[in-house]
Amino acid sequence: MPADLHIHSTASDGRLTPGEIVKQAREAGLSAIALTDHDTVDGIQPALEAAGSSGPEVITGIEFNTELDGADIHILGYYLSLEGDLASTLAGLRAAREDRVKKIIDRLGQLRIRIDYDHVKRVAGRATMGRPHIARVLSETGYCASQGEAFERLLARGKPAYVPHHRLDPFMAIDTVLKAGGVPVLAHPGLAKRDELIPGFVARGLLGLEVFYPFHTPDDQARYQKICLQSGLIMTGGTDCHGPGFRYPPLGSVTVPDETVERLKQVVGHRASGCRRAPTARPATVD
Ligand code: AMP
Ligand code: FE
Ligand code: FE
Ligand code: ZN
């Protein structure tokens, strides 16, 4: 049975609750799902409770939105341990996100687009705040026709209300995942198109590439498959499902086989058993 390893819930900017995601995954016949909310693991416990003993397996995941040399680089982490320093790192990121939302609202104000921080906060609830929540407020208040238009006209990189993330770079995100005992994977490399950075990430401890992704071209998929085979990286994949109202496809429409989940578990198991030869990737070469 297949697994979808890239899903967002209401713990970050998704529209489905962890419980709804588990239910849909069960209906879709998935054996495992990874909840990979932006900068938070708050959805994991409710998802585990919803899955109970009948499944699917809920993999503790995360997606760190980072930035390097003007590129948006997202790092996924799988099988993280929730003990240790992870919580304090995530609390710092949450505060940085709130600060960034305030800066974006100031920029919008300069453009005579007046929305309230409290309104965005209300829309986000207890989630880690992000641009999608601002986009929802912009469409609810009629400044934009849709969330997509809010990004295209105002919020996307290069648009007038864009404010960069400042907290983590991809190397720090890889370190954070490794320190939490997890498996770091480069999310949707075909979007950032910065393949020349991959060898440096692998040298830092990256163990996989997200090869199977809704917006990868057949060329992207073939290129990243080749890099994975050459350097012993794990090929992961998933939908990046954010629920209704987003451009991403429904949960379970992009999957990886159970063996991929087994490989992720092997890495974690080797480490937990104190094995000094825990799997690592070979130096990556990019043509
Ligand atoms: P943030 O974490 O605040 O930088 O927001 C990033 C999130 O915004 C992504 O994970 C997507 O969910 C969403 N997003 C990014 N670009 C677009 C876009 N062009 N249209 C709609 N949603 C987008
Ligand atoms: Fe998102
Ligand atoms: Fe992403
Ligand atoms: Zn994502």
Image: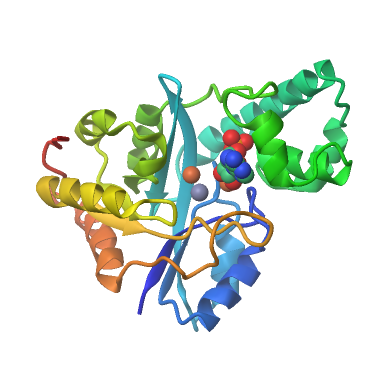
Q: Answer above or below: position of 21 versus 120.
A: below
- If the image is split into quadrants, where does the N terminus sit? bottom left
User: Is there any visible trace of residue 204 in the rendered image?
Assistant: yes
Point out residue 165 in the picture as x, y percentages from the top left corner. 56, 25
Instruction: Determine whether, in the image, residue 95 is placed left or right of residue 211.
Output: right
Q: Answer above or below: position of 67 versus 229.
A: above
Instruction: Determine whether, in the image, residue 166 is placed left or right of residue 258.
Output: right
Q: Which residue in the rendered view is the most extreme toward the top? A: 110
In which quadrant of the rendered view does residue 151 lie? top right
Q: Answer above or below: position of 199 versus 188.
A: above
Point out residue 81 in the picture as x, y percentages from the top left corner. 42, 51
Point out residue 117 in the picture as x, y percentages from the top left corner. 83, 31
Residue at point 16%, 50% (across, down): 226
Viewer-proximal residue among 222 and 51: 222
In which quadrant of the rendered view does residue 52 lie? bottom right
Point out residue 237 in the picture as x, y percentages from the top left corner. 36, 58
Total number of numbered labels? 0
Q: Identify the coloring.
A: rainbow
In which quadrant of the rendered view does residue 71 lie? top left
Instruction: Determine whether, in the image, residue 205 is placed left or right of residue 70.
Output: left
Residue at point 41%, 40% (across, down): 191
User: Is there any visible trace of residue 129 in the rendered image?
Assistant: no
- If the image is split into quadrants, where does the C terminus sit? top left
Residue at point 82%, 15% (across, down): 110
Instruction: Determine whether, in the image, residue 119 is placed left or right of residue 89.
Output: right
Residue at point 70%, 32% (across, down): 153
Viewer-proximal residue among 26 and 82: 26
